[in-house]
Image: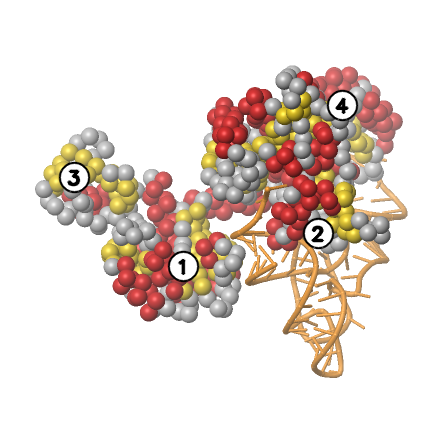
RNA sequence: GCCGCAGUAGCUCAGUGGUAGAGCGCAUCAUUGGUAAUGAUGAGGUCGGGAGUUCAACUCUCCCCUGCGGCACCA
């Protein structure tokens, strides 16, 4: 007999070999039907798998998060079964659960096509209808390897061979199909809700290594019911409408063209936004004790050899040999330039920490497949800064920088910021005592931030540990924006020094930090974050004055002049068009405020203000009130405080 | 870079082995209309680039470029 404890604290005795399904069935039929998987002593457990000794048991349904994951995992298996049925020349590899769904990687000489999806989905539905029981089997490792090799599943055999020695080899069987899998799984294929959909086809390297062959990955989404599936598909559609590439086109912010892959042609409105961001950052940096510098875009290649970029980053650098036979490179990073400014003349400990900011345009020859709108470009502008400080000042500087980053993100309404902490890699420079201190300083700042973070052990740069601040775009892709890195390397390579209190030369620690990261990427994130409807202070065009008839032309002209004098970005629309037409056009452009003026407004010197997103609702205000109200509203957040 | 898909007017897209079409936009004219599209007329394209197959290629084949979805990369 074994004793089972339930979540409500009750305990009951059962025969040895009892399964969660037996127990559920003994309580009620509906419970047995509803339960998809069990949690046994914190381990997920198949419903039919016999319990092994006294256990704590919880029965989970599709409404538990584990239940949804299970559904997605089974959807991946059903996909694999369907694909192998329809395309027998296909080998299976792995098929895990991901956000919102699952994927399965297949090996097959012939390419799948999205045209195959309909057929595959139909086959999946058949497998669900057949309601095959899903059975767990434990196999002998060596026999399993031989078996999977024999049936031509080389990838599975490789996976088994690489499993840790103690790990049991489990195989799940559904109908005449079976797959190596750790499990657990649903009791039967009929438990899989028909609320799945195959989404896209992609290439993916075997085991994520670009030296390996490329497999074909089929992505799918799966939910507990059709309503959730539809809601998810609707969310995706909505998100796609926010795509910065589409909005930038509609709003006339920038464009890209074939001759400049990964390069942005800024249009006046986009550039206004860009400059507004720079102006904001400049004020914030001034306030935080930074000075601003600017260094050359093009430098002799020898500088990059000294810095180590030639060796470590050379393939990504644009360089050229000029008629003077000197080789020059466009800077892929600003740091070596910053160090030159630091090194020009002798530094004293009294000058530290020295915080030098630079809005530097960097050029990187990124892999063609990495380019993505303005999120991943080949020429971009960093709000970069290098802080030179003593080891003692390091911790406080890190704290201040993290504070500044998060405060700035808040001004843009970003509250779901993720932080990644990467510590010392195997191959590194600098002694462990300094690494200890640097990692501790970053960790301390990280904890003080109080945000969710992940630690990537060994992922730090060879020259120091780093923090990365990650924002998510409209379609759920994560983009690194801000960064804070400790660097022992460059000060060493460029022999940076300061004279300490003791009169001796010392090596400063260097911090690299960027808050927006790339102005281009941050702009892209902002477009999607606000769906193009920027807060007034950021809006490239803050207000359009539109006339109803030409009777109001001279008044409208006067209004626009007054708005511009007040520092607002105002435009005038005197065209001989109906007001309906004008309102529609400026609404499509997501213009924040439309000031409609007709005879009435001209007579009593007022404005009829219409706000983006608020329909036909209008507010009649006097010109004076509008000026003061809008000016206040358009004040950047840092100047309002 | 790798796998797959795509590239037709400024934009969004339709189209066929016999040298192209729509809507919007643009231009001109008429219209002075109170909050999401007034009407008419017109201009605009070596169908991404190159080579090949063919009597004939925007259409079929190959190479290249660019973009899109992933993977790898992101010092």
User: Would residue A635 appear left or right of A392 to someone viewing this image?
Assistant: right
The circle drawn on residue A261 is 2
Q: Residues within 10 Å of mark 2 (few under 14, many from 20)?
A: some
Q: Are marks 4 and 3 in contact (CB under 8 Å)?
A: no
- Residue pointed to by mark 1: A93
Disc 4 or disc 1, which is closer to the eye?
Answer: 1
**Could you say which is closer to the camera, residue A118 or residue A526?**
A526
> What's the chain of the residue with tag 1?
A
> What's the chain of the residue with tag 2?
A
- Residue pointed to by mark 4: A607
The answer to which of marks 4 and 1 sits earlier in the sequence is 1
Residue A591 lies, in percent from the top left, at 71, 33
Q: Residues within 10 Å of mark 3 (few under 14, many from 20)?
A: some
Q: Could one spot residue A542 in this view of the protein?
A: no
Mark 4 residue element: strand
The answer to which of marks 4 and 3 sits earlier in the sequence is 3
Q: Residue placed at 58% from the left, 21% from the top?
A: A393
The answer to which of marks 2 and 4 sits earlier in the sequence is 2
Mark 1 residue element: loop
Disc 4 or disc 3, which is closer to the eye?
Answer: 3
**Could you say which is closer to the camera, residue A354 or residue A265?**
A354
Q: Is residue A634 above or below residue A179?
A: above
Q: Could one spot residue A362 in this view of the protein?
A: yes
- Residue pointed to by mark 3: A54
Q: How far apart are the alpha carbons under marks 4 and 3?
A: 77 Å
Mark 2 residue element: loop
Q: How far apart are the alpha carbons under marks 2 and 4?
A: 45 Å
Residue A44 lies, in percent from the top left, at 28, 43
């Amino acid at each position: 007999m074994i004793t089972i404890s339930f979540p409500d604290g009750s305990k009951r005795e059962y025969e040895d070999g009892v399964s969660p399904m037996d127990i559920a069935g003994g309580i009620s039929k509906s419970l047995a039907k509803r339960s998809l998987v069990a949690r046994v002593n914190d381990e997920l457990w198949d419903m039919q798998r016999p319990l092994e000794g006294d256990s704590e048991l919880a029965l989970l349904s599709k409404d538990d998060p584990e239940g949804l994951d299970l559904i997605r995992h089974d959807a991946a298996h059903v996909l694999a079964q369907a694909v192998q049925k329809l395309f027998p020349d296909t080998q299976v590899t792995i098929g895990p659960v991901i956000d919102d769904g699952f994927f399965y990687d297949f090996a097959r000489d012939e390419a799948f096509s999205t045209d195959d999806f309909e057929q595959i989905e139909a086959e999946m539905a058949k497998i669900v209808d057949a309601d095959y029981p899903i059975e767990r089997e434990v196999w002998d490792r060596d026999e399993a390897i031989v078996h999977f090799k024999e049936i031509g599943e080389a990838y599975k055999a490789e996976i088994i061979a690489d499993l840790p020695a103690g790990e049991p080899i489990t195989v799940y069987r559904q109908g005449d199909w079976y797959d190596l899998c750790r499990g657990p799984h649903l009791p039967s294929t009929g438990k899989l809700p028909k609320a799945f959909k195959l989404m896209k086809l992609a290439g993916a390297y075997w085991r994520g290594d670009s030296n390996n062959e490329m497999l074909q990955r089929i992505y799918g989404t799966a939910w507990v019911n059709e309503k959730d599936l539809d809601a998810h598909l609707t969310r995706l559609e909505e998100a796609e409408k926010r795509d910065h590439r589409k909005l930038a086109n509609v709003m006339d912010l920038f464009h890209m063209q074939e001759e400049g892959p990964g390069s942005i042609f800024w249009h006046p409105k986009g550039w206004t936004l860009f400059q507004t961001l720079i102006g904001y950052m400049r004020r914030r940096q001034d306030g935080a004790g930074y000075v601003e510098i600017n260094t050359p875009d093009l430098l002799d290649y020898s500088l990059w050899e000294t810095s180590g970029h030639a060796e470590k980053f050379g393939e990504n650098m644009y360089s050229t040999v000029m008629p003077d036979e000197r080789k020059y490179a466009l800077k892929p990073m600003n740091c070596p330039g910053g160090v030159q400014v630091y090194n020009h003349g002798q530094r004293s400990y009294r000058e530290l920490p020295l915080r030098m900011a630079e809005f530097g345009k960097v050029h990187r020859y990124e892999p063609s497949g990495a380019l993505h709108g303005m999120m991943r470009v080949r020429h971009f502008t960093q709000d970069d800064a290098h802080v030179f400080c003593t080891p003692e000042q390091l911790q406080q500087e890190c704290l201040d920088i993290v504070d500044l980053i998060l405060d700035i993100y808040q001004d843009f309404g970003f509250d779901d910021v993720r932080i990644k902490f990467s510590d010392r890699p195997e191959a590194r420079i600098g002694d462990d005592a300094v690494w200890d201190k640097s990692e501790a300083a970053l960790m301390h700042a990280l904890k003080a931030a109080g945000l969710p973070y992940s630690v990537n052990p060994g992922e730090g740069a060879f020259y120091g540990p780093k923090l990365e601040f990650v924002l998510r775009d409209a379609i759920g892709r994560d983009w690194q924006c801000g960064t804070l890195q400790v660097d022992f390397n460059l000060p060493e390579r460029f022999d940076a020094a300061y004279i300490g209190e003791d009169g001796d030369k010392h090596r400063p620690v260097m911090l690299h930090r960027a808050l927006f990261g790339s102005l281009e990427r941050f702009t892209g994130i902002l477009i999607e974050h606000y769906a193009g409807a920027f807060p007034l202070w950021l809006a490239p065009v803050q207000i359009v004055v539109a006339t109803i008839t030409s009777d109001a032309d001279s008044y409208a002209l006067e209004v626009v002049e007054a708005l511009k004098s007040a520092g607002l970005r105002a435009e005038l629309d005197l065209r001989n068009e109906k007001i309906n037409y004008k309102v529609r056009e400026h609404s499509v452009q997501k213009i924040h405020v439309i000031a409609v003026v007709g005879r009435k407004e001209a007579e009593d010197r007022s404005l009829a203000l219409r706000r983006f997103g608020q329909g036909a609702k209008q507010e009649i205000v006097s010109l004076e009130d509008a000026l003061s109200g809008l000016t206040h509203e358009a004040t950047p957040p840092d100047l309002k405080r």
